[in-house]
Amino acid sequence: MNSSVVMPIIGYMSSPYREKFGIPRQPNLVQVESYIEMVEPYNDVLAFEGIEDFSHLWLLWQFHDNKNNTNTLNQEPKFRSQVRPPRLGGNQKVGVFATRSMYRPSPIGLSVVRFVRVEKHGKSVRLYVTGSDLLNGTPILDIKPYIQYSDAIADSVSGYAQDEPIRKMVIWMETAQLQQQYLLKLGILNKKILDELEQVLSLDPRPAYQNDIERVYGMCFAELNIRFTVDENNITVIAVESNQ
């Protein structure tokens, strides 16, 4: 029996998440706008006819930048029967099929996002969404409409991930505020990106096992490099610079 399946890539995600550090651990925690650039022959606007009647979509995608998995869908990745979910502090192991870990037998992800619009740019077709948790450049395997009456289960139970993570307050040091104002003046930063950035930071992007309040962390978001510290209640931005 053939143990592998070859799937076509229909497009690639364009998002402000330029590295895995900082990506929300679930979709719809941060309302960042991103878009899927469709590739031939799937860049046909007729393929999206009727999609505006749905508020949300399912995206099926590939974990393409996971060094512990193979990089293609027709090769078998290294199998881990147990992983350490961040929601359990990164210390407790559970079965891989009881998690959404990237370390899976098939490097496939599933995210529900909010539909925004479809735009045609020359020969290109772009599908705009918000709430994505996908790295920039993520290959998209399929797009399906979210069906409210069947996909939303009112009495569902989500184990150790039943509640949304607690958000921290984002504080800007004076030097970082001056840098922020300078980047706003240059047009490198705008109010929309600033709001999205603060949403990302409020979720505490650190790995679960890191809790050093003295450590300065760095993160790339859109065209920005951000440095910050974390304590029990706050994220303190100490610097924000352009990476252009």
Image: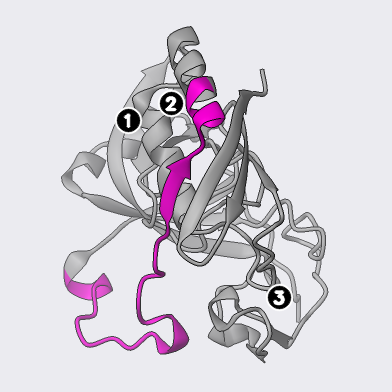
Question: How is the rendered protein coloured?
Answer: one colour
The mark found on residue 125 in the picture is 2
Query: Which stretch appears magenta?
Result: 149-178
Residue 76: name its quadrant.
Answer: bottom right
In-image side of 238 versus 210 (left or right): left
Quick one: 223 or 217, which is closer to the camera?
217
Disc 2, disc 1: CB below 8 Å?
yes
Q: How far apart are the alpha carbons under marks 2 and 1?
A: 7 Å
Amino acid carrying label 1: it is Val
| Element marked by disc 3 | loop
Q: Position of residue 30 (x, y in %)?
A: 39, 50
SS at circle 1: strand
Q: Label 2 is placed on what type of residue?
A: Val
Give the residue at mark 3: 105
Quadrant, the C terminus: top right
First in sequence: mark 2 vs mark 3: 3
Please give the name of the residue rendered at 59% of the width and 26% of the height, measured from the top-left corner.
223
Tell me: 183 left or right of 242: left
Residue at 38% over, 20% down:
120
Label 1: how many Cα within 10 Å (few below 14, some 14–19, many 20+): some
Front-most of residues 91 and 67: 91
Say left or right for 75 vs 171: right
Q: Quadrant of residue 220?
A: top right
Say the numbered circle drawn on residue 118: 1
Which residue appears at 44% of the width and 10% of the height? 185
User: Where is residue 212 drawn, in percent x and y?
Assistant: 69, 65
Q: Is residue 168 magenta?
A: yes
Q: Residue at x 36, y 41 (%)?
A: 129
Q: Is residue 146 magenta?
A: no
Please state if 51 lies on the left or on the right of 122 as rendered. Answer: left
